[in-house]
Structures are given as structure tokens and as C-alpha cells.
Image (cartoon, grey):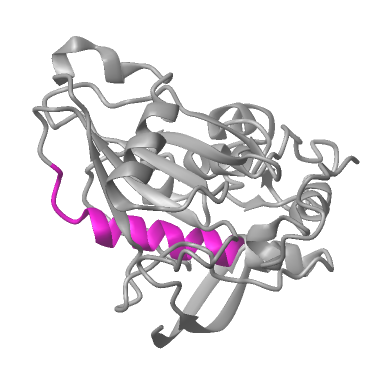
């Protein structure tokens, strides 16, 4: 187990917050005795597509941003998570990226639409000897620089079975930065809000829209896409928040509690 300390300057909901992160890294391969779920980053490649450069760095930035976002807003609504870092990481603190290579070429069209998630998770588990502890799987589909990007984003899950989210990996120059709002600048180009929205579904979260009549916090993570929100409220508000109902819903998810008690109980609101 490794320890890595770093300062993160976070801009969330219009406020700038400084966090001291002590990464007590989840090892790259949790022990078989660890029967609790973790979150895994998966890069899916067709048989004839090479991985783009910088994948580990980009997905580590997204993992950092996601953990900070959930921690901040869950604590904001008085549902602070006991576990603040849940992505499996290397000893360096970088997120572990599991590469799954498909058996079909990109031209087959098989990877253009969702529907392969179960097979991808099965292959990741089999090839990496990962215990089936009902984890969360964030699957990033890269179809190469000469193919249209994967845009059939999907997500689903609950505390009983774990969950998965599928998003397109866009090999664009730029950084995911904790001091930039989720729907601003490069984050908007990268579709970061859509990516994290689907990961919210992997926790079991439903769609919950923002307070349109009193938009004090911007768009909600589980609310509409950026363009739909902007059409109602204008493009200036680029903030995104986690609503209090969502925070309450996932507070006792074993990813956050690191306990298995009440795992078979699906919360209701």
C-alpha cells in the first residue's frame, strides 16, 4: 500500500476549495480477501486500434476530479463519505487502467453502439484475475483517430449488483483540472459532464434535474445535457453540482462506506 500526498485546488459550484489529498492507494490488485467493491477504469479497443498516448494520465485526472466532486458535494449536504478514494490505483497514485482488446475490427461497427458491456467486464475479470465483488466499471471506448468517436453513452447499476458506465474516449489535447467547472472550457469539449453523469447511473442514481426556477447551483450532475441546460438558463452558467437527494441515495453504497452491511437493500427516496 502506498501513500501519496498532494494539494488539489478545486472549483465546484462557483467556490474554490483546497483539499489536501492523502492517497492511501488501493493496490493495483486488491487481495482476494477484500470482498468489497472498487471502481475500475477500462479502456476498450477494437482488434485493430492502438491505444492513444496519455491514456493513464487523462483517466487519472478524471478519477481525481470525480472523487473530489462526489466528496465535496456529499459533504456539502451532510452525507460525508467515509471512503474518499475508490478507484484502484498503482503505487504511484496513477489510476490503474485495464485494457480490454476486442476480437473484431473497428470497421465491423460492433463497437459503435452499447451492448458489449457485459462481455467487456467478463474479459477484464478473466484476464486480470479480479474477484467478482460487484465493482463499478467505467468503460472508455476508443475507436481510433480515423473513426467517428463513440457517443452511445450508457450507465446503470445498484448496490446489489455493482454497475457500469460506458463513454467515448476522446484523444484531445488538454487537461482535466480540478479548478475548472465541469461544463466549462476543455471539460465541455471533452463531454466530461456526460461521462460523469453515466458514472452516476452506475451507482444507481436516477435522473434528477436542477432547480430551474431557482438555479443557485447550476446544472445538476444527473440533470440534462449541457446544451439543454444552456438553452433554458443561458451559456454563462457552467457550474455542475450533485443534488442532495443523490448524495443521500449513495451515502451508504459500499464504495463509500467500505462496509458490506445492508448491501442487499436498495435505498428509496
Q: Which residue lies furthest to the front in this view?
A: 33
Q: Quadrant of residue 43?
A: top left
Question: Which secondary structure class fits the magenta region best?
Answer: helix
Residue 114 visible in this rendered orientation of the protein = yes
Seen as rendered, the residue at the extreme right is 269
Front-most of 5 and 253? 253
Q: Which of 219 and 254 is in front in this view?
A: 254
- From this viewpoint, is residue 13 visible? no
Is 59 placed left or right of 255 in the picture? left
Q: Is residue 81 left or right of residue 245?
A: left
Q: Residue at x 71, y 39 (%)?
A: 205
Q: Is residue 74 magenta?
A: no
Q: Quadrant of the C terminus?
A: top right
Vertical relation: 107 (above or below) 227: above
Say which residue appears at 71% left-offset and 66% top-offset: 259
Quadrant that contains the N terminus: bottom left
Name the quadrant containing residue 45: top left
Could you say where residue 103 lies in the image, as x and y percent from the top left?
Answer: 18, 24
Q: Depth check: 260 or 54 in front?
A: 260
Residue at horizontal 47 percent and vertical 62 percent from the top: 87
Which of the pair 105/131 is nearer the observer?
131
Span shown in magenta: 51-69
Query: Left or right: where does residue 29 sit relative to residue 26?
Result: left
Query: Who's the residue at 35% across and 67% down the image?
Result: 28
The percent position of residue 126, horizontal first and vertical second, equals 33, 43
The image quadrant of residue 120 is: top left
1 versus 212 height, above or below: below
Residue 12 x, y percent position in the rendering: 61, 63
Amino acid at each position: 500500500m502506498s501513500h501519496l500526498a498532494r494539494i488539489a485546488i478545486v472549483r465546484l459550484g462557483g467556490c474554490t476549495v483546497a483539499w489536501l489529498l492523502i492517497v492511501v492507494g488501493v493496490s493495483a490488485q486488491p487481495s482476494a480477501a477484500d470482498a468489497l467493491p472498487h471502481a475500475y477504469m477500462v479502456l476498450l479497443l477494437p482488434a485493430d486500434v492502438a491505444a492513444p498516448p496519455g491514456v493513464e494520465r487523462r483517466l487519472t485526472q478524471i478519477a481525481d476530479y470525480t472523487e473530489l466532486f462526489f466528496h465535496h458535494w456529499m459533504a456539502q449536504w451532510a452525507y460525508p463519505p467515509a471512503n474518499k478514494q475508490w478507484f484502484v490505483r498503482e503505487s504511484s497514485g496513477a489510476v490503474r487502467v485495464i485494457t480490454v482488446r476486442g476480437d473484431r475490427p473497428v470497421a465491423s461497427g460492433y463497437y459503435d453502439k452499447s451492448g458489449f458491456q457485459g462481455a467487456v467486464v467478463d474479459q477484464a475479470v478473466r484476464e486480470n484475475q479480479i474477484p467478482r465483488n460487484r465493482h463499478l466499471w467505467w468503460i472508455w471506448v476508443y475507436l481510433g483517430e480515423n473513426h467517428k468517436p463513440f457517443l452511445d453513452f450508457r450507465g446503470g447499476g445498484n448496490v446489489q449488483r455493482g454497475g457500469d458506465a460506458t463513454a467515448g474516449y476522446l484523444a484531445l489535447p488538454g487537461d482535466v483540472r480540478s479548478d475548472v467547472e465541469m461544463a466549462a472550457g476543455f471539460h465541455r469539449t471533452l463531454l466530461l459532464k456526460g461521462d460523469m453523469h453515466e458514472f452516476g447511473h452506475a451507482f444507481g442514481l436516477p435522473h434528477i434535474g436542477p432547480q430551474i426556477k431557482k438555479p443557485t447551483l447550476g446544472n445538476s450532475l444527473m440533470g440534462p445535457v449541457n446544451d439543454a441546460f444552456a438553452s433554458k438558463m443561458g451559456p454563462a452558467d457552467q457550474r455542475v453540482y450533485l443534488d442532495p437527494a443523490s448524495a443521500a441515495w449513495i451515502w451508504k453504497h459500499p464504495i463509500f462506506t467500505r462496509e458490506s452491511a445492508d448491501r442487499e437493500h436498495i435505498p428509496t427516496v
